[in-house]
């Protein structure tokens, strides 16, 4: 795919790079993927700059709720509001270039950053198509308030998308618990991701520029798609590589 960085993991159906997302994206070949499913750091967790620049353990969780095992911190979650908006626009611009015309770029976010992400999607040149809601019944609740137990997937396309791009329609709303046993603080459920990656055609390639612990890659392989991931943290890159290898052994992509 034209990337000068040596892959951290490479096989017939999956490839993983360990490096900065924007840097690797800039080197990837134009039109080389069918869809992007991205879960970037939200730089959220508070109402003011001081809150948002706190550690991820302070803002989110510190340990797995089942095992009690401490969850390692992750990087890139302390940008201020303007920095986050500009950075999001930069990497989304590259994501659009890498995605084939008519392909989908979708980005996870929370309620605080939802307006910023919808703006960044449009500033990057994508055609904004909508917002998918993910309701987490086991999400955190605060007495006397509405529960903030939703996350969102903002999605757009690289130009027009043919109505016959896929022979099925995906959901616009999901009700799925967050994983109780996890290795990454913001790990998404495989059940959710397995449906989302179906926005790429069977045999198509899904890109996740913020691979984390590799859940999107596992989901893509399970659904017969190919996968390209980028992860900045060597610790999580190693976990993702192991996850991809195991997934390919169990159920290789078509």
Image (cartoon, rainbow, N blue to C red):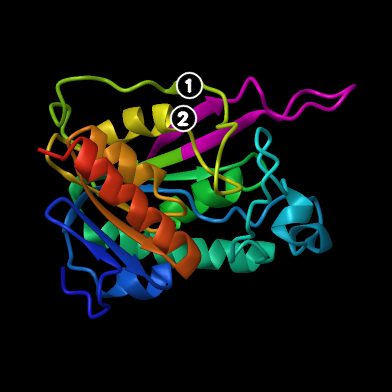
Helix, strand or loop at label 2? It is strand
Q: Is residue 126 visible?
A: no
Mark 1 highlights which residue? Answer: 174
Residue at screen point 33% across, 27% down: 195
Residue reaching furthest to the right: 144
Question: Which quadrant: the N terminus?
Answer: bottom left
Residue at screen point 47% across, 54% down: 212
Q: Taking 15 as reference, is 52 left or right?
A: right
* Image spot of residue 52 (x, y percent): 74, 59
Q: Taking 46 as reference, is 208 left or right?
A: left
Q: Do the residues labelled 1 and 2 touch (CB within 8 Å)?
A: yes
Q: Taking 142 as reference, is 66 left or right?
A: left
Looking at this view, is 146 or 68 the one in front?
A: 68
Question: Residue 148, relative to residue 18: is it above or below?
Answer: above
Question: Residue 22, relative to residue 204: is it above or below?
Answer: below
10 Å crowding of disc 1: few (<14), some (14-19), many (20+): some
* Image spot of residue 245 (x, y percent): 27, 50
Indicate which disc, 1 or 2, sits on the residue closer to the N terminus: 2
Q: Which portion, as a residue range, is magenta?
A: 126-153
Q: How far apart are marks 1 and 2 (CA)?
A: 8 Å
User: Is 116 within the magenta?
Assistant: no
Q: Can residue 80 be seen in this view?
A: yes
Question: Which quadrant: the C terminus?
Answer: top left
User: Is 140 within the magenta?
Assistant: yes
* Image spot of residue 104 (x, y percent): 28, 43
Looking at this view, is 215 or 54 the one in front?
A: 215
């Amino acid at each position: 795919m034209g990337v000068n960085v040596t892959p951290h993991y490479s096989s017939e159906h999956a490839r993983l790079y360990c490096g900065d997302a924007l840097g690797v994206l800039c080197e990837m070949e134009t039109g080389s993927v069918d869809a992007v499913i991205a879960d970037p750091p939200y730089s959220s967790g508070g109402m003011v700059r001081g809150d948002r620049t706190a550690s991820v353990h302070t803002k989110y969780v510190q340990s797995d709720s089942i095992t009690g095992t401490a969850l390692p911190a992750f990087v890139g979650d302390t940008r201020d509001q303007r920095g986050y908006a500009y950075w999001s626009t930069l990497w989304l611009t590259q994501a659009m270039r890498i995605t084939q015309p008519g392909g989908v770029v979708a980005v996870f976010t929370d309620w605080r950053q939802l307006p910023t992400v919808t703006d960044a999607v449009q500033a990057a040149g994508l055609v904004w198509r909508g917002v998918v809601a993910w309701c987490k019944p086991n999400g955190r609740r605060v007495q006397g308030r509405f529960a903030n137990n939703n996350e969102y997937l903002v999605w757009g396309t690289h130009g027009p998308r043919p109505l016959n791009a896929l022979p099925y329609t995906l959901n616009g709303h999901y009700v799925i618990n967050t994983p109780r046993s996890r290795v990454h603080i913001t790990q998404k459920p495989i059940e959710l991701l397995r449906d989302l990656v179906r926005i790429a055609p069977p045999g198509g390639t899904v890109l996740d520029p913020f691979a984390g612990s590799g859940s999107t890659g596992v989901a893509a392989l399970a659904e017969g798609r190919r996968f390209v991931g980028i992860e900045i943290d060597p610790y999580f890159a190693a976990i993702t590589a192991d996850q991809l290898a195991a997934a390919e052994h169990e159920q290789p992509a078509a």
